[in-house]
Image (cartoon, rainbow, N blue to C red):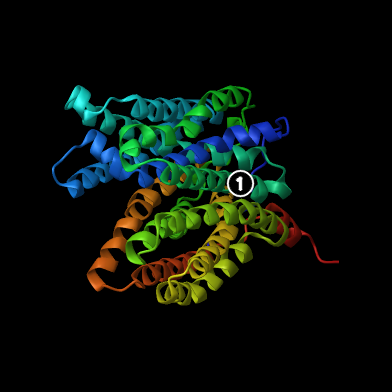
Amino acid sequence: MTAIDVDAIEPMPTIPSVRTRHVVAVTMGNALEFYDFLTYAFFAAQIGRTFFPSADPSASLLAALATFGAGFLMRPVGALVIGRIGDRVGRKPAMLLTFVLMGLAMIGLVLTPAHSAIGIAAPILAITFRLIQGFALGGEIGPNTAYLVEAAPLHRRGLYVSMQYMSQNVSILVSGLVGFTLATYLSEQQLDNWGWRVAFLPGAAIIPFGLILRRQLAETLPAPAQQVQALAAPARLRMIAFLGIVLFAGGTIASYLQDYLTTYATSTLQMSTRIGFLSTIAVGIFGIVCSPLGGWLSDRFGRKPVMVVPYLVLLIVVVPGFWLAAHYRTTGSLLALTAAIAICACISDASMMVSVTESLPANIRCGSLGLMYAFAISVFGGSAQFMVAWLTDLTGSPLAPAWYLTGAVAITLFAQSHMLESAPQKLAAKARPAR
């Protein structure tokens, strides 16, 4: 297979430099997504009993998880519809639309009365709000990543895009702390009655601030005369699409398996819930440190080495790490496994995202990037936790998640090896005539 020939990046329009509050505004969508995802996952049993009561607790839980999964089905639709708005109208209106929809969906779910109060309307409303949120989240990644790449200084693109991932890890840390606190101080009945609703409040609280900040953003969509037309190189674009989906599939599997370690610790290793939440907290801490580090390294040394090296390390350590955690079943072995996966994945994530984004022409950047990411996360991310749980149950082996992740990492390394360098600094240095 021929590697992608990444052309020189098209000139960006002149816009005001992005300030800290603008980066925060753009990355809030990702933060809200991960906070909502983890909070729903942590309290799926309580949500199931609220909206899908059944004599069989497993039936309630499965109904809640199915409702959560329904949101993934709408992500490609949102990526297509909102991505076209971002490419034709502007990045800013697309990001405002996604944030409004995300906010309405999150608040709507929290305020929906229980099945005992309004009957069948409760699960119908819950499903509707999850579908709206999935639609919005599908349309979020394209415009906000395109904005960060277009607004950042050429030598800081990796660092700016890494702020998305850092914001996700801030959300992971907050959700872990909230879950840990509620599990410690509330009874199971209190969690059922109102505790799970309280857990969503930190996410709902940032919605008005996010809207205010996003309204102040400058537009970065290049004028038509400045855009490189996508139709000029269809074969190259098909290759970018294929490799981009593979990169995002591997990255999202690694990310969702980090989140799964809380469940893995409690359900497979039979450790306490409080220890399981420590794993989530550790993922957040490592991600907050390693995501911007990875973005900075990719600006300094190039996208490709920062993509490849951490995944090579992950390929080597993931099976031994799971074996140690399963064999010793101590807090230290669990946190060591968490650290190994989180550090490697977080250092590499931003490089993969910015590499694909830089390779796409501006006139299709939002839609194409959003569709690639939405497809990967819907098919591979959305199924990752189910697959590892099913494989563990099928094989009876606590190493099943390790082998699943190893396969994903190996395929991702294949895609990484076929991506050529896209960092503007490196391309400029390569084009410079030898003296």
Q: State which quadrant residue 238 falls in.
A: bottom left
Q: Is residue 73 visible?
A: no
Q: Is residue 293 above or below residue 136?
A: below
| Residue 71 pos. (x, y %) | 32, 39
46 or 301: which is nearer to us?
A: 46
| Residue 428 pos. (x, y %) | 73, 55
Q: Is residue 42 above or below residue 324?
A: above
| Residue 288 pos. (x, y %) | 61, 51
**Kind of residue at disc 1:** Val
Q: Is residue 428 above or below residue 78?
A: below
Please give the name of the residue rendered at 56% of the width and 28% of the height, measured from the top-left corner: 210
Q: Quadrant of the C terminus?
A: bottom right
Q: Quadrant of the N terminus?
A: bottom left
| Residue 339 pos. (x, y %) | 55, 64
Please give the name of the residue rendered at 28% of the width and 67% of the height, measured from the top-left corner: 391
Furthest residue toward left: 55
- Disc 1 residue crowd, few under 14, some 14–19, many 20+, Cα 10 Å: many
Horizontal arrangement in the rendering, residue 68 relative to residue 121 (left or right): right
Residue matched to label 1: 161
Q: Secondary structure at mark 1?
A: helix
